Amino acid sequence: MNKQKIPLINASDPSQEEAVFILAMENAHVEYYPNWLSHKHAKSLMDYFIAQLQWQQPSITLYGQQRLIPRLQAWYGDPDSQYEYSRLVMQPLPWDIRLAKLKQACEQKCRARFNSVLANYYRHGRDSMGMHADNEPELGAQPIIASVSLGQTRRFTFKNIHTKETYKIGLEHGSLLVMKGDTQQHWHHGMNKSRTQTGPRLNFTFRHVTQKK
Ligand SMILES: O=C(O)CCC(=O)C(=O)O
């Protein structure tokens, strides 16, 4: 299997301060903004969200057995943004004010509208997220997903569903990763456990879900 760091194409505009990289992956459109939030702002958001969000550790059914998910999570959104994955039905909590502001900032950056967010709290290196695609019908065929990371840099893996090619990228404190186009149709993504990247990390994936008819 081809395991490598993702080649990054620097697409930054020299007249702008913000750096942006396009991940050179076939049949995908992924952009990475390493310093999207200032270090200080990101730290303030992290402390606030750890203390204020309603973190839970639900169970999912895996190979017929109930297992606690290996992280904490919370689902916030508009009242009609119910979401289901791994047979776990999540009812949205009402928007927290600072989370709603972060959503607005993502909407401006992505020129898209989001009505919900999956918040994940990786308490230490043993917390993780299995490989998956965000391809539930509620998200539509070409979902735009804005993923904000706070805290410990953790290695994020993409794996091509067809060729099994694997790429890794470290998602840094205050960064924004945007997945769009056909990314979810051709690539899985996830976060392995780590023995070296052990500090706490928060991640927020803003999405737009529509209800099943
Ligand atoms: O923590 C991350 O960066 C990944 C989150 C993720 O894959 C998801 O919410 O679907």
Image (spheres, grey):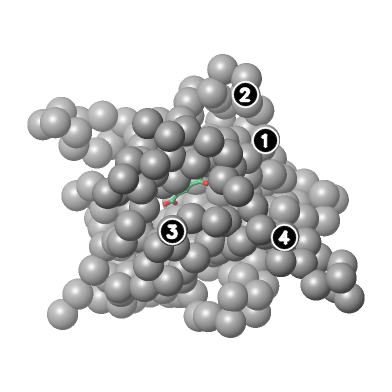
- Tell me, yes or no, whether the two marked residues, 2 and 1, touch with CB atoms within 8 Å: yes
Q: Which mark is first along the chain, 1 or 3?
A: 3
For the residue labelled by badge 3, is the local secondary structure a helix, a strand or a loop?
Answer: loop
- Which is more toward the observer, 160 or 35? 160
Q: Identify whether 101 is placed above or below 202.
A: below
Q: Residue at x 10, y 31 (%)?
A: 64
- The amino acid on which the numbered mark 2 sits, given as a three-letter code, is Thr
**x then y, percent, for residue 179:** 49, 63
Please name the amino acid that badge 3 sits on: Glu
Of residues 96 and 193, which is closer to you in this image? 193
Q: Quadrant of the C terminus?
A: bottom left
Which residue position holds label 4?
Answer: 10
Q: What residue type is disc 4 on?
A: Asn
Q: Are marks 3 and 2 in contact (CB under 8 Å)?
A: no
* Secondary structure under the numbered disc 4 in the rendered image: strand
User: Label 2: which residue?
Assistant: 198
| Mark 2 or mark 1: whose residue is earlier in sequence | 1
Above or below, comparing residue 106 to residue 153 in the picture: below
Of labels 1 and 4, earlier in sequence is: 4
Q: Which residue is mark 3?
A: 26
